[in-house]
Image (spheres, rainbow, N blue to C red):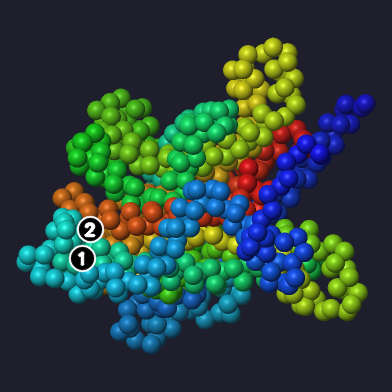
């Protein structure tokens, strides 16, 4: 067999699928823009009045209307909107008067910090739980994992957050309350990455670091629980699938220890689809952050969107929606690409 | 087979239901239903889920009888405000001196209203888009599935949030927004089912008889997609309830003084530390009801869609 030719054709098919991905990505992003554009047009708020006020003379009103491009045909407005969105121009926030993209860049690290910690917690605990549940199928542990999953799918995240605050902050005093860091510590470090845990640790402000930890631990565990519910359930079903395969029997017949069969052989094969699951749960946490950030007064993208909503700041709402949508799409595509890279059967 | 003990012959109603040669269509249908119910009732958790859902419906119907106080008009603000749970006020009272139990009871109507309306709006849309796309194929399929993918690409709550922001807060707009975000997965499922049905012999036979495309889709494809869709919608109900409650919590769903559970939790947030029951009780109601729908959905899936049960 010509191995070199195999490489070339593998590369070609990889390039081809990558090109397909790019096309899918472009059309989906364009669709997202179309949806937010459409929402922006059906808003009952007149954007001109929002800027000039309702007592402005007609000439001023007309001038601003022309400046905003609202007198042109809808299709042309959409083209302009997409052009601006591509360069990252979502307009200015009425509330903060900054460009929306600047605002989003300021708040996004906070959301990223929370979602990343949540996914880490969910993965670290979810995968072993799922594996054990699959290995000891029907056992008490399996039932427990099922229950954890069911509760995770059914409980309102904002309510669980409030109950967590009540118990661990108000009653037991184990963790700090809402917010990212105490005011006392907030001037001890200079924000570089925007991720408080990294900034404080890099600058050696350990008191501030531990304060930030005690703030982040509860919301991170909360998001972690929701990610755990999903990851453990999926791990269990993937593992059940793998454990029924013939190579597992072969490995056992060879006399490998059960530990090795489960953790080295079966889990390694289950790990490929798990990458997709983890990426999906990461994307879901970005969504869950809207409610969580509201409950914990966490200054991230979710809180930014809800604050803007309550102040009818549509540029900020739509910009934030588009950014979350785009991140969501990208994560989905990345997980798809990873899947193809990791699983030789898809080549 | 001589050694095998004779099978006990069912008699009476059961025999009629299980008859291998049903005399009428309705007998056959009832028989199928009975078999399904037998499989379903073997799963105790699913029966619990069904119980919760039935309880929700009963509470919603008989809210006037069950609730001891008015859900809107409060009591004496000086003496009956923020009282802890007691024999007179089972779940305590809120900041307007209203009985929380009565509000939770009436809130079941709103929850049921939202769930039913979203299901009634989103299911037909998804069914139609999915079956048309799967049956016709070609560019229609490509276009419809691209649109579906775009809607799937948005996180659900965020898209609903943006829609409510545009339409204005309120329960009706929340329902529309949730319905708009709910149909894409149904379309996907209906399309997948349609693809397996499309090339079967009976469709070819109907086609040869001269049936029109709308007739084939509505009369022959849609009915076969419904059972897997019912499972999916039931499993989705919990998500719908949670999204609606989330919108209510953010102040974008039902407006005060409507006793919407999510909005009630939001009120309770202000009194969390000293009067925990104001937030805890309505949240517990959301949890129990969505748990019930999830258990019911799991059970239904095992019966109607055994392939997916793993």
Does A171 sit above or below residue B250? above
> Can you see residue A293?
no
Dot 2: few (<14), some (14–19), or many (≥20) neighbours within 10 Å? many
Where residue B169 appears, x then y in whole percent? Answer: 38, 71
Compared across the picture, whether B216 is left or right of A157 comes to: right
Q: Quadrant of the N terminus of chain A?
A: top right
Q: Measured from the top left, where is residue A152 in percent x and y?
A: 44, 45
Q: Nearer the viewer, residue B132 or B310?
A: B310
Q: Which residue occupies the foreground of this view, A303 or B70?
A: B70
User: Viewer-proximal residue, A114 or A295?
Assistant: A295
Up-down: is A184 above or below A25? above
In the image as oriented, which residue stretches furthest toward the top?
Answer: A255
Chain at tag 1: B
Residue A258 seen from this side: yes
Mark 1, secondary structure of its residue: loop
Give me the chain letter of mark 2. Answer: B
Look at the image and tell me in which quarter the C terminus of chain A lies: top right
- Please, which residue is most extreme toward the left here? B78
Which residue is labeled 1 in the image?
Answer: B99
At numbered mark 2, what does the secondary structure look like: helix, strand or loop? Answer: loop
């Amino acid at each position: 067999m010509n191995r070199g030719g195999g490489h070339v054709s593998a590369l070609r098919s990889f390039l081809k699928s990558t090109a397909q991905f790019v096309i899918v990505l472009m059309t989906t992003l364009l669709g997202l823009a179309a949806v937010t554009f459409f929402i922006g047009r059906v808003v009952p708020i007149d954007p001109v009045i929002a800027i000039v006020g309702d007592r402005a003379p007609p000439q001023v009103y007309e001038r601003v209307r022309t400046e905003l491009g609202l007198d042109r045909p809808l299709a042309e407005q959409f083209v302009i909107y997409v052009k601006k969105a591509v360069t990252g121009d979502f307009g200015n926030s009425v509330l903060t008067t900054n460009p929306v993209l600047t605002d989003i860049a300021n708040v996004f690290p906070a959301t990223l910090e929370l979602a990343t910690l949540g996914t880490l917690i969910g993965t670290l605990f979810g995968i072993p739980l799922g594996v054990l549940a699959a290995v000891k199928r029907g056992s008490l542990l399996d039932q427990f994992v099922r229950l954890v999953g069911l509760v995770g799918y059914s409980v309102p995240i904002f309510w669980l957050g409030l109950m967590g605050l009540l118990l661990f902050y108000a009653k037991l005093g184990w963790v700090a309350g809402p917010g990212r860091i105490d005011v006392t510590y907030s001037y001890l470090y200079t924000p570089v990455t925007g991720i408080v845990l990294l900034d404080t640790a890099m600058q050696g402000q350990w008191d501030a670091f531990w304060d930030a930890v005690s703030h982040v631990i509860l919301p991170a565990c909360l998001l972690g629980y929701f990610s755990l519910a999903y990851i453990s359930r999926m791990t269990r079903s993937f593992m059940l699938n793998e454990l029924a395969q013939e190579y597992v029997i072969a490995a056992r017949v060879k006399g490998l220890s059960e530990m090795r069969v489960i953790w080295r052989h079966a889990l390694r094969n289950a790990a490929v689809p798990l990458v997709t699951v983890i990426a999906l749960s990461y994307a879901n946490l970005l969504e869950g952050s809207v409610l969580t950030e509201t409950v914990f007064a966490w200054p991230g993208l979710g809180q930014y969107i809800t604050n803007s909503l309550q102040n009818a700041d549509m540029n900020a709402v739509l910009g934030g929606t588009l950014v979350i949508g785009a991140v969501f799409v990208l994560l989905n595509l990345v997980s798809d690409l990873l899947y193809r890279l990791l699983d030789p059967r898809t080549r | 087979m001589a050694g095998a003990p004779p099978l006990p012959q069912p008699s009476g109603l059961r025999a009629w239901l299980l008859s291998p040669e049903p005399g009428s269509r309705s007998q056959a249908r009832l028989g199928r239903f009975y078999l399904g119910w037998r499989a379903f009732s073997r799963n105790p958790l699913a029966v619990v889920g069904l119980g919760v859902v039935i309880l929700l419906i009963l509470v919603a119907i008989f809210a006037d009888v069950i609730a001891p106080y008015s859900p809107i008009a409060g009591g004496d603000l000086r003496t009956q405000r923020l009282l802890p749970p007691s024999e007179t006020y089972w779940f305590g009272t809120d900041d307007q001196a209203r009985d929380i139990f009565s509000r939770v009871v009436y809130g079941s109507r709103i929850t049921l209203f939202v769930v039913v309306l979203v299901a009634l709006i989103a299911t037909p849309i998804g069914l139609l888009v999915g079956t048309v796309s799967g049956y016709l194929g070609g560019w229609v399929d490509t276009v419809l599935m691209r649109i579906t993918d775009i809607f799937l690409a948005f996180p659900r709550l965020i898209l609903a949030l943006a829609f409510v922001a545009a339409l204005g807060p309120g329960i009706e707009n929340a329902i529309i927004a949730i319905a708009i975000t709910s149909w894409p997965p149904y379309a996907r499922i209906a399309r997948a089912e349609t693809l397996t049905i499309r090339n079967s012999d009976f469709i070819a036979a109907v086609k040869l008889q001269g049936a029109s495309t709308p007739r084939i889709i509505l009369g022959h494809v849609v009915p076969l997609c419904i059972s897997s869709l019912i499972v999916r919608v039931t499993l989705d109900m919990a998500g719908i309830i949670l999204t609606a409650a989330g919108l209510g919590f953010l102040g974008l769903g039902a407006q005060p003084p409507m006793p919407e559970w999510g909005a009630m939790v939001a009120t309770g947030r202000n009194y969390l530390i000293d009067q925990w029951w104001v937030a805890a009780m309505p949240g517990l109601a959301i949890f129990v009801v969505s748990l019930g729908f999830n258990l019911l959905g799991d059970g239904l899936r095992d019966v109607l869609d055994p392939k997916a049960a793993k």
